[in-house]
Image: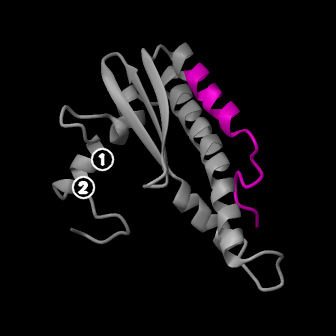
Amino acid sequence: MTLPYENATSGDAALGEIRKVLTKFGCARFGTMTDTEAGELIVQFSYRGMDVTARASYRGYAAAWLKEHPYTTRMRGTRVDHERKAMKQAEISVCSVLRDWIKGQVVAIETGVLTFEGAFLGQILLPTGSTVLEQARKVGLLPAPGGNTP
């Protein structure tokens, strides 16, 4: 089985497409940022006074890629080289994943399948600077990541 987006090559182009989709949708502000310390791509935008922050993990994708393509001693290069290759592909693939997710959410909103709040609830920023999802986890409304209850 192949990992979705493992052959993606359009990292920057995918980010440009996100910008086009959100601009056409009516978003007032848009920006992307890479957090290399956390291993995340961050997309931020504003829609009708609501700020949204969507985070996607490079490390998570790289771990999935390594699971699909485990290192063996028969490969050229070292384990570290193999892990770098996984991270490099993850940085490209995550852009495409976010593009398709955001595009899907916008289509769902435009066609009346979801409300804006329903589509992006977890990513809406609160006045405190945390997202609704982060706050829900903090106060124990949701299980902790990994399925453990707080």
Establish if 54 lies above or below 80: above
Label 1 CA crowd tier, 10 Å (few <14, some 14–19, many 20+): some
Q: Which residues are magenta?
A: 1-21
- Name the residue that disc number 1 marks: 133
Disc 2, SS: helix
Name which residue lies at 39% across and 20% down.
47
Q: Is residue 4 magenta?
A: yes
- Name the residue that disc number 2 marks: 137
- Quadrant housing residue 80: bottom right
Establish if 65 lies above or below 76: above
Q: Name the foreground residue: 88 vs 20.
A: 88
Q: Position of residue 88 (x, y in %)?
A: 67, 55
Name which residue lies at 43% across and 55% down.
38
Q: Position of residue 58 (x, y in %)?
A: 55, 54
Q: Is residue 112 visible?
A: no
Quadrant showing the C terminus: bottom left
Q: Name the foreground residue: 118 vs 127.
A: 127
Q: Is residue 66 magenta?
A: no
Q: Position of residue 52 (x, y in %)?
A: 37, 31
